[in-house]
Amino acid sequence: MLRIVIGGLKKDVIERSAKAAGGDKVQVTVTSDFDAAKKIKAGDADYYLGACNSGGGAALSVCIGILGYSNCSTVAKNGKKPNPAEIEKLVSEGKIAFGMSVEGIEEAVPLIVNSLLKKNNLA
């Protein structure tokens, strides 16, 4: 089971999208971005999903500070659609924190969750 923590804006939409994509293969916890990053660092969660208006600022800033820049990536910036091939690449590279714009949540979250399930042999 993947343990996903959620922070940022529109947490309810991210939560609903993650649960719909992962079903009983994901455990989703809604919290603050600070607590989410601490949970990952402590080994109490596996992945972070967060959103802000731009997709790259507040969605990931705390995670970058706590988990390191190399573990984080923006997958859907404001005004742009998420790229499935890019998400697959980021997941395969071992990224654990994903940021997106609020307008990209419903498209990006299922792509991320499905890629994570595949990587972890849960698909």
Image (spheres, rainbow, N blue to C red):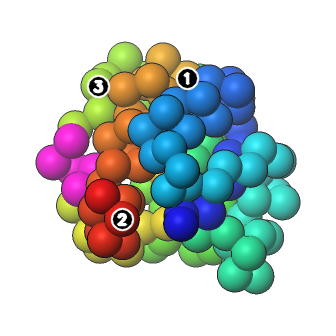
The x and y percentages for residue 85 are: 15, 48
Q: Read off the residue under disc 2.
A: 122
Q: Report how far apart the C-alphas of labels 1 and 3 lie in the structure.
A: 11 Å
Q: Quick one: label 2, few (<14), some, or many (20+) residues within 10 Å? A: some
Left or right: where does residue 55 sit relative to residue 83? right
Per the image, label 1 sits on a secondary structure element best described as helix
Image quarter of residue 94: bottom left
Left or right: where does residue 61 sit relative to residue 73? right
Relative to 89, residue 107 above or below: above
Q: Nearer the viewer, residue 61 or 83?
A: 83
Q: At 30% from the left edge and 58% from the top edge, which residue is drawn?
A: 123
- Visible in this render: residue 13? yes
Given this view, does label 2 or label 1 mark the residue nearer the observer? 2
Residue occupying the far front of the picture:
24
Q: Is the Cβ of the residue at disc 2 closer than 8 Å to that at disc 3?
A: no
Q: Read off the residue under disc 3.
A: 81
Q: At 55% from the left edge and 39% from the top edge, which residue is drawn?
A: 19
Relative to 8, residue 79 above or below: above
The x and y percentages for residue 56 are: 52, 41
Would you say residue 87 sits in the magenta stretch? yes
Relative to 123, residue 99 above or below: above
Per the image, label 2 sits on a secondary structure element best described as loop
- Visible in this render: residue 101? no
The x and y percentages for residue 62 are: 72, 57
Q: Earlier along the polypeptide chain: callout 1 or callout 3? A: 3
Q: Read off the residue under disc 1.
A: 102
**Which region of the structure is painted magenta?**
84-88
Image quarter of residue 45: bottom right
Q: Which residue type does callout 2 highlight?
A: Leu
Q: Earlier along the polypeptide chain: callout 2 or callout 3? A: 3
Per the image, label 3 sits on a secondary structure element best described as loop
Q: At 61% from the left edge and 42% from the top edge, which residue is drawn?
A: 50
